[in-house]
Image (cartoon, grey):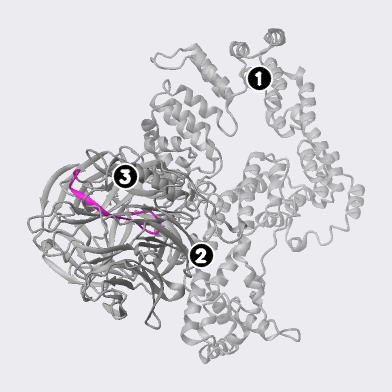
Amino acid sequence: MRNLKLLKCLRSLELQSPGCPQCLSVRTDTGSLLIASQFSITEYDPRTGQVLNEVSLTAEDYLPEDGEGVLVGIQDLPEQESVCVATARGDVILYNLSTNQLECVGTVDSGLTAMSWSPDQELVTFCTGQETIILMTKDFEPITEVAIHQDEFGEGKFITVGWGKKETHTIGLFNMLMHYNYIFHIYKDVQPALLWDDHRPRITWRGDGQLFAVSAICSQTGSLIASTQRHPNKHSVVFMEKNGLLHGDFTLPFAKDQAKVKELLWNSDSTVLAVWLEDMNPGDDGNPNTYIQLWTVGNYHWYLKQSLHFGRDPLKAPACVCWDPEKPLRLHLLSQGWASYTYDWGWCTDRSPGDDSQDSANVAVIDGDKVLVTTFRQCVVPPPMCSYELQLPAAVNLVTFHSQTQRTNELAALTADCRLHIYSQGVLTRKLQDKGTKNKSHLSIHSFLFLHGLETLIPFWGKNFVCGVISSQVQVEGHVISLCHSLKSDTLALQLEDGQIRRVHWGECFSLCICVEVKEDECLSLWCCLQVASNISSFVVYGEFLLLTTHAHTCRCLHLTTMSIRDLKAALSSEATQNDESVRKVERGSRIVTVVPQDTKLILQMPRGNLETIHHRALVLAQLRKWLDDLKFRDAFECMRKLRINLNLIYDHNPSVFLGNVETFLKQIDSTNYINLFLTELKEEDTTKTMYPCPMSAACQSASGSGGGGKKKVDTVCDALRSSMETLDPQKFCLCILTSHVKKTTPELEVALQKVRELRVNPPTAKNAASAEEALKYLLFLVNVNELYEHSLGTYDFDLVLMVAEKSQKDPKEYLPFLNMLKTLEPNYQRYTIDKHLKRYKKALHHLSKCGEEHFTEALNLVKDQRLYIEAMQLYPSDSPQHKVLSVAYAEHLMEQQQAEQAGLLLWRCGEMACALQAFVSCTSWRHALAVATHIPLPPEQLAQLARDLAGIVEGWGGAVHVLDCEEAISALIEGCAWEEALRLIYLYSRQDITETHLKPALLEGITNVAFLESQKALFTRHKNRLAVVREQKAKARLELIDEDGPDCADAELYSEASSVLTGSRIGSKYSQSNSRISTRSSKNRRKAEGKKHSLKEGSPFEDIALLHALIQIIHVIHSLLKALVLFQFDMLASNLQAHYSELLQLMEKGIPEIWNEGLQQGQTLITGPNSTANSIMASFQQPRPSRVHQQDAEILIPPKMRQSVKWKLCILK
């Protein structure tokens, strides 16, 4: 769906020579033209207008001086640096371009009518006046000669021609020749040559040089022969295979006897066919109109892309036309008046530039006097079909779409007669011919832009462009080959032939730095000041994306707003990574046609012409993110469902927004099936980090970092949806509510079954509500039937159990006896039996504890078997005998687990003093042991013996508190949180009254540590974050100081995580004098200075040191507090404190590597010594090092070690 766009027209009128041009060839190494007339051979450079070489053909009598001589062919021979010319007399002449000498290499007495060299210039073919064909080598050694019209073998017979040795024979070289003669003879026998036929033979070679054909009018392509054929009602160009069979045709846009074809010319890559035509009936002045048409093929349809009309002026009529052999889309033309034209065409796709939903994604295809328009937003129609076509009165050469927002569906078409036609939605709205363009050669108009209405149509002529309807004209240095307009910035840009870009401000031009260069081999190179890529086959810019196809058969979609030029180059030169949404494999040779704005469709055209619609993952995700940001959940859901995008992205894109708009989501989706599909696809994975990583500019919020409130993602979404569904319409969303229960991390099957039971008890009244049968059937679809049966049994509802059992494959003999047995049991014992059967031992214990003392032995066995000591002790009062038995059993278990101290605490509080004493002695808990011994009480002798046994660890007990009296010492220990020592002294001095008056209140007051821990947690986080900011600011400030003052700058040390000994030794006098003054101050002033040094005031020089001090002070240990709380049966409070303290320690453990990084320790000393090298010492100087600190503060640079071996937690707490 591409059009031919004229990039440049180079016209030169400086060449003047006698006679008329007869033959034209292009010198491939220089690009100059080789022109032969009846008088001379001329080498002419159309770019400079200079004649490079010229030699007369009449001086040496190769042609007559009267101008009646005729040349039949000219060919540039680069290897020989010569030009080969054949005359009608029969002379074959070589003109050496280096020596400027002529040489006749041979003569044919009967004369020559045609000459043609093979594409590789290894062979040359001549047609003689005796209607024979001579085949020679490039050195003009004859290979063979054969008659065009053969009588010996008959028409249509094949011949074999060879030369040299047998193994080098070429078989079938003339097969094409003879078979084509057969076809030619058929027409010759049926009808004689027309009157206007010049009776000159044409020789055409196949592109690989293996076959050639001779006929009246024909031309080669890759594997076809092009010729013309007249029918009773039309004139056609037909294509034949080498076996003579017809292989397609197209009809010329003329009446039957209106025009004749002078030549058919294929370009070098056989993509464009030039048809040179001339009117058969001349005008009143006796001169006919002359035309050159350019035809291309796509999807087996031939399109007329360009129509050049030269009028009736005989001096402007083409005399010679040829394609450039090196640049496939360059056409050279020489008029009868010696005017030289060089046309450079390029492929382009004319698409509407809109980026809103109003734009129909139009693509216009030129086809003669029609413009085929396809609106890809509504439908994808393969060419040559289209959505609608515009019929114009003349052939169309240029089309463009309006560049103003909301009007991008309007189209302007420029016809070959220089008339402009404006269409809106397929309706002609205006037609005009601008006065300024009448005097301009339409062959030079190659671009125009449609801006802000007709008052700003901008046509281009080579080095000039016109703003408005010839209202102003601007001269541009260089040839303008294309232009574009930005809808957002309203900027007009011109691209010059040399790749430069000029930005236009209506009369003022200045340079830009981005351009696109089109290579001759149709390989695009992207440029942004420097070459970014060279393997691009097509590209388009859509919004913030650059989409392109490569010759590696991939389609790339790059996010321009997040990429620099270097990033763009790296992305295009590297291989795609896993889950790289910017790369997609496409069919070989695919090209981009257009992108549908505000949609996900990307239209590609295959080499054969058919279309393919793909949804590039990057475009899809970008559009989905826009829809989700705009809360268009329905559009996003349908797109994700159709294109198989994981539905987790709906939540993962922005969890907080989704959770805040759950009702909007449900109302837009409004389908139980869709909601169930969304719920069943939920998983804990954050798809924005794994499957669909967010580009840097996209506003994506991680699902793992917000919206869940500490809960798991699946549970959060299920709970939020269920809550909203129960509020909106619980009967309508019944099945969805069941799904939300089943899908949770721990499936709530019992709750789901209870809802089914409620439906059975209270049938829904709504029309489309699900019944209990349907709900149960749906549950069985989600959950294995045997698993559901077990969970239904856990509801203790035997009717529900029977409902589920009937849907299963179980034999009634398997479950009916068991259910009947359960019905005979007491309710609590019945539930105990069910829970034990389902291995729900905690619930079983709970129900068994309600069955009375007669079942306590069974409960105790269950507790011991399943180790449910903590749960069991919570079920019985602390003063009950059952609680004491459980405590003793738990203590025995702890002793087995080497937890003697905790076992002693349990035994002590339940009154088993002797056992508690043994437990404390076994774990050398001397304070507890002595306290229990005093509490028993032991006789003085035994107590003394116990003290002597524990003498090794009681050394120094009591400490400084012995200077006080008993009560004051115990109070001091309690205030200092020395719980174990205080308890020992209480029993030592038999002051159990202090337990109630001082100890227990102090313990309860210590529970405020929970609030303290929360504050410390917030303080720790704040200090850690502030420390990171301070270090970053200091590093930045230091770099700035070093850049300004050099590495010896004194102030750089204060602003660095890093100061070297070298820098410290060269600190300026300002700081050295200050330090000396401080050293002479009093101790009071020094303490004051130390306090300022540890100030947390933001911006202070040593703020980072102060923050390290503050962070160290936060770490506390409260193991003894937990043990004291347990001893006096404050289990719940102790458990809460233990949990909060555990969270704080985890936070600190994670923060230590960030606070005390490796640079703090590595930078303390320089790497010097006998084993050092110059490089290592210089590297040591350049390493960042922490700020210089006082010796007494040096320990803060060493990170505290978390004592993982210390078991501070109590296993009897949860």
Q: Residue at x 60, y 51 (%)?
A: 1009
Amino acid marked by disc 2: Arg
Amino acid marked by disc 1: Asn
User: Could you tell whether 59 is left or right of 1010 in the image?
Assistant: left
Cβ–Cβ under 8 Å for marks 1 and 2 = no
Depth-wise, is mark 1 or mark 2 nearer the camera? 1
Secondary structure beneath label 2: helix
Name the one closer to the observer, 299 or 1141: 299
Say which label, 3 or 1, has the lower sequence index.
3
Say which label, 3 or 2, has the lower sequence index.
3
Provide the residue designation for mark 1: 786
On the question of residue 814 being in view, the answer is yes
Q: Residue at x 65, y 56 (%)?
A: 975
Provide the residue designation for mark 2: 1026
Q: Residues within 10 Å of mark 3 (few under 14, many from 20)?
A: few
Q: Which image quadrant for residue 452?
A: bottom left
Does residue 877 belong to the magenta stretch? Answer: no
Say which label, 1 or 2, has the lower sequence index.
1
Which range of residues does the magenta coloring cover? 255-272
Q: CA distance from mark 3 to mark 2?
A: 98 Å
